[in-house]
Image (cartoon, rainbow, N blue to C red):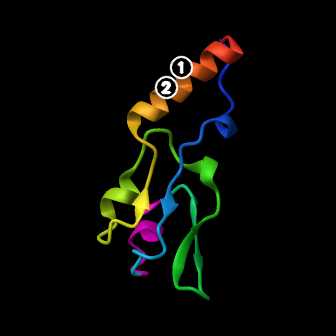
Amino acid sequence: MARIPRELIPWYPTVNTDLCTGDRACFDFCRNDVFAWDEETGRPIVKNPYSCVLGCDACAQVCPAGAIAFPTQEELKATVRRLREELAV
């Protein structure tokens, strides 16, 4: 069975810079190199979005400011179902 290319699945964090306190919790937590640290702003940036593990939202859970968001699990499941149908995988 063929796999859905990861780049077609929009599962990755977004950072609300208005809420972000720059505490580095997400950056220090993620071991998948999703984030880079922007020294100029003192905030994380999503550098490698497709390195994020599908379904993982742990960085959002460790963010004390609640500055990280993901699509819902339902949205993820619906996207994967749609892509399976479209790509016949």
The residue that label 1 is drawn on is 81
In contact (CB < 8 Å): disc 1 and disc 2:
yes
User: Callout 1: helix, strand or loop?
Assistant: helix
Q: Callout 1: 10 Å neighbours few (<14), some, many (20+)? A: few
Left or right: residue 54 versus residue 33 is left
Which quadrant does the N terminus fall into?
Answer: top right
- Which residues, given as a range, are shown in magenta? 22-30
Q: In the rendered image, which quarter is residue 39 located in?
A: bottom right
Q: Amino acid at mark 1?
A: Arg
Q: Return the residue at label 2.
A: 78
How far across and how far down the image is residue 31, in percent? 49, 58
Q: Magenta segment: does it hold 49?
A: no
Residue at 32%, 63% in the rendered image: 62
Q: Give the residue displayed 44% in from the left and 70% down from the top.
A: 28
User: In what element is the residue under mark 2?
Assistant: helix
Q: Amino acid at mark 2?
A: Ala
CA distance for labels 1 and 2: 5 Å
